[in-house]
Amino acid sequence: MDREGHDVVIVDRDPNAFSRASTRGVLTRDFRGEQVVGNGTDVDVLRRAGIEHADGFVAVTEGDNRNIFASQIAKHVFKVPHVVTRIYDPERAEAYEKLGLHTICPTIEGAKHIETSLMERA
Amino acid sequence: MYVIVVGGGTVGYYMSRDLVERGHEVTLIERDARRADWLETQLGSIVMRGDGCEVRFLASTGIERADAIIAVTADDEDNLVALQMAKRHFRVKKTIARVNNPYNVDIFKMLGVDEAVSATDVLLGALEPPLTS
């Protein structure tokens, strides 16, 4: 997204996450976005990341509940127009989709993908 | 009253013990197996091991007939999700949360939790009179 010209801010509670991402080549040197260290479910940290002017918000930590909470703060407290939440647990994803969160469930999506590619080869 | 307590840490343990002593029916939910075993040696069969955020597990606790659910884990997001499931999915009348970050008191109420209690706020409140005088 940064390469496509969007302004991107990454929030991670682990200060080492950013250098790890650089070492692995995930975050390359041309990344112009900002990096904020802190808990993404803390309104103060989110404000520091500039959430008040954000057009979009994506919650993709390894914790379903953390993603759910952060996304609801973005959507309901800061009124961010586009919010996407990753939820691994299919039941929880379905429940929160019903509650109005735009959810992506990699478990279900992955299973569908695998099934499609299996059928194509059969 | 039938009360479900989510989280068997120190707060959840003493709260459950107290509720039982006062004559209430209690189910205490604890995710960690070893902790759940220990809680059972202290409190007996009211302890259930499982994830209080999972709809299917919550259904097995008889949550439809619960009068209240109190979430007291050390993680605010886990408390929120457990209570939202209880409220929206099972229509539990009273949902009460322990919040660890005091900023979350108002946010939890915005997100549909009936009562949110911050230990930090309570302790600061106890300190406040001498500070303002």
Image: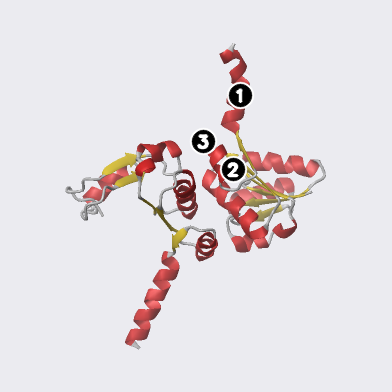
Tell me if label 2 and label 3 are in contact, CB under 8 Å: no
Mark 2 or mark 3, earlier in chain:
3
In the current view of this chain or complex, which residue is farthest to the left? A30
Provide the residue designation for mark 1. B125
Q: CA distance from mark 1 to mark 2?
A: 20 Å
Three-letter code, disc 2: Lys
Q: Which residue, given by chain and number where applicable, does mark 2 sit on?
A: B109
Label 1 to label 3, Cα distance in Å?
15 Å
Q: Earlier in the sequence, mark 1 or mark 3?
A: 3
Instruction: Report which residue position mark 3 lands on.
Output: B103
Label 1 environment density (alpha carbons within 10 Å; few <14, some 14–19, many ≥20): few
- Foreground: A119 or A71? A71
Q: Which residue extends farthest top? A: B133
Task: Tell me which residue sits at (56%, 44%) in the image.
Answer: B110
Q: Say what secondary structure mark 3 lies in.
A: loop
Three-letter amino acid code at the position of disc 3: Tyr
Mark 3 Cα shell of 10 Å, populated few (<14), some (14-19), many (≥20)? some
